Amino acid sequence: MTTTAPPPASAASTAVDGLRLDERVAARYAELPPQERKGADVLLEHFGDLATYSAAELAALAGVSKATMSRLFRSLGFDDFSQVRDHLRALRQHGLPLGLGDAPDLDAHVEAEAAAVRVAVAALAVHLDPVADLLAHAPRVVVVGLRTSYPLALHLRQQLAQVRPHVALVPQPGQSLAEDLVDLSPQDAVVLVALRRRPPGVRALVARLAEAGTPVVLLADPTARALAAHATWWVQCPVQTRGAFDSYAAASSVVAALADAVLGRRGRTGEQRVAGIDSAYRALGEVEARGGAAER
């Protein structure tokens, strides 16, 4: 009995494996026949909302036949347009801004945001007592935020600095991480804000902190499961939305709740610091004059 070996993968497919759709087009464009180039032009032109079209609609936009579009998809390493859609969904789940539908449904948007906040706050509630105690009383707290996580890290640092001293934000503009982390001890604390599309060095950072015994509070989305294995606590903050861009509403809510919990644990000392900073604000003219408590 003889068996027939499966046909080898085409050179077109293997040459573009692992590339994003637009990168596949760029790699293969010069070799495409003129009609397939027309289709490729449409793919690039509509890359941001490609998943909202059917293969027939794309063919019509390009002025080519559906058979030509099918050949183009195969030239780019896909069996058919359903694989292209799967590819686009995978990119979106990785955080790449891609339009996946029509005009946003604002009611659905609000519901999705509320659901994400509930998930994140529930995750915080599981660890709130030990995390808030640590951030309230550790000798030093370092808040780390890279790329798009930096604004949230900056905001958390500002909140914590209102209620306790010795809170640092790293990295500072133009600086590296090592100088600020090398002296951390097991008595200190690190809050790592690491939402998706993180730089690859984050894994080495978390592993190094774990090796040093420094407690790590990880605020990250569900794609950070590998990082969470090295963190002391993981507060999962969903960022996936129905639209093209990630939402940080859940993570922002966690930051606010966590800062409030730390203030409560600082007690009278925290309240005195808030009052002192408020007096300094007014003396320096750093915030507009108004009544009420200090803005945090």
Image (cartoon, rainbow, N blue to C red):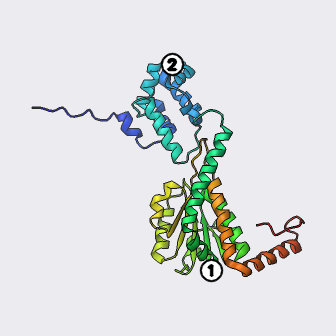
Q: Do the residues under discs 1 and 2 have CB atoms within 8 angstroms?
A: no
First reached walking from the N terminus: tag 1 or tag 2:
2
Any part of residue 179 in sight: no
Task: Provide the secondary structure element on which disc 1 rests.
Answer: helix
Density class for disc 1 (Cα within 10 Å; few <14, some 14-19, many ≥20) is: some
Q: Position of residue 267 (x, y in %)?
A: 71, 79
Q: Eyeballing the image, is 185 above or below 222?
A: below
Is residue 241 among what the camera can see? yes
How far apart marks 1 and 2 lie (CA) works out to 67 Å
Above or below, comparing residue 103 to residue 197 in the picture: above
Quarter occupied by residue 172:
bottom right
Left or right: 260, with 57 as reference point: right
Q: Which mark is residue 268?
A: none
User: Residue 229, image x and y in percent?
Assistant: 44, 65
Residue at 39% across, 31% down: 79
**Quarter placement of the N terminus:** top left
Q: Amino acid at mark 1?
A: His
Disc 1 vs disc 2: which is toward the camera? 1
Q: Which mark is residue 137?
A: 1
For the residue labelled by badge 2, is the local secondary structure a helix, a strand or a loop?
loop
Q: Nearer the viewer, residue 5 or 244?
A: 244
Quadrant of image for the C terminus: bottom right
Residue furthest to the left in view is 1
Q: Which image quarter: residue 191?
A: bottom right
83 or 101, which lies in front? 101
Q: Residue at x 54, y 33 (%)?
A: 51
State the residue at coordinates (61%, 82%).
139
- x then y, percent, for residue 30: 47, 31
| Vertical relation: 282 (above or below) 187 | above
**Residue 106 versus residue 37: which sits nearer the camera?**
106
Q: Which residue is mark 2?
A: 64
